[in-house]
């Protein structure tokens, strides 16, 4: 059963505190969870206020469906980040199969 892992690095230039960072990250995480069937978590320790790394994982029985879904998730992350005045610095996908 294939598993897709999307790692996204975001820059939040306007974040002046941990509270500013959390508002952006929480909004992105909540909207992605509501729109897609996925798991999402912060992968860094949160010391730097204007940077965050998110790990997004999805699983499906169909590799083709999973590839399309990951592309939609990546586009949604870019769209959500732009709406929250954040910037996607880097994103990369790994598809793991048995």
Image: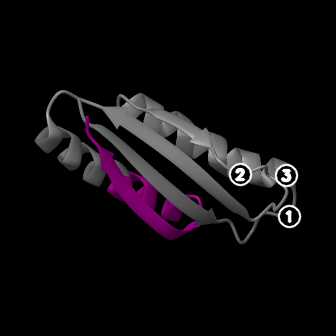
Judged left or right of residue 80, residue 18 is right
Query: In percent of the image, x 25 and y 36: which residue is there?
Result: 2
Question: Pointer 1: what residue?
Answer: 16
Please identify the quadrant where the N terminus is shown. top left
Quadrant of residue 3 within the rendered picture = top left
Judged left or right of residue 3, residue 12 is right
Crowdedness near tag 1: few (<14), some (14–19) or many (≥20) residues, C-alpha within 10 Å: few
In magenta stretch: residue 77: yes
User: Measured along the vertical axis of the image, is residue 16 above or below residue 77?
Assistant: below
User: Measured along the vertical axis of the image, is residue 31 above or below residue 8?
Assistant: above
SS of the residue under disc 3? helix
- Tag 3–tag 1 contact (CB < 8 Å): no
Question: Pointer 3: what residue?
Answer: 18
SS of the residue under disc 1? loop
- Magenta range is 74-98
Question: Pointer 2: what residue?
Answer: 44
Query: In percent of the image, x 52 and y 37: which residue is there?
Result: 40
Q: Earlier in the sequence, mark 3 or mark 2?
A: 3
């Amino acid at each position: 059963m294939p598993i897709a892992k999307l790692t996204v690095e975001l820059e939040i230039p306007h974040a002046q505190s941990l509270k500013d960072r959390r508002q952006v990250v929480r909004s992105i995480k909540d909207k992605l969870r509501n729109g897609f069937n996925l798991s999402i978590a912060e992968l860094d320790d949160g010391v730097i206020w204007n940077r965050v790394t998110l790990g997004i994982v999805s699983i499906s029985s169909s590799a083709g469906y999973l590839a399309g879904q990951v592309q939609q998730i990546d586009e949604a992350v870019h769209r959500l980040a732009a709406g929250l005045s954040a910037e996607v610095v880097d994103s990369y996908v790994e598809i793991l199969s048995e």
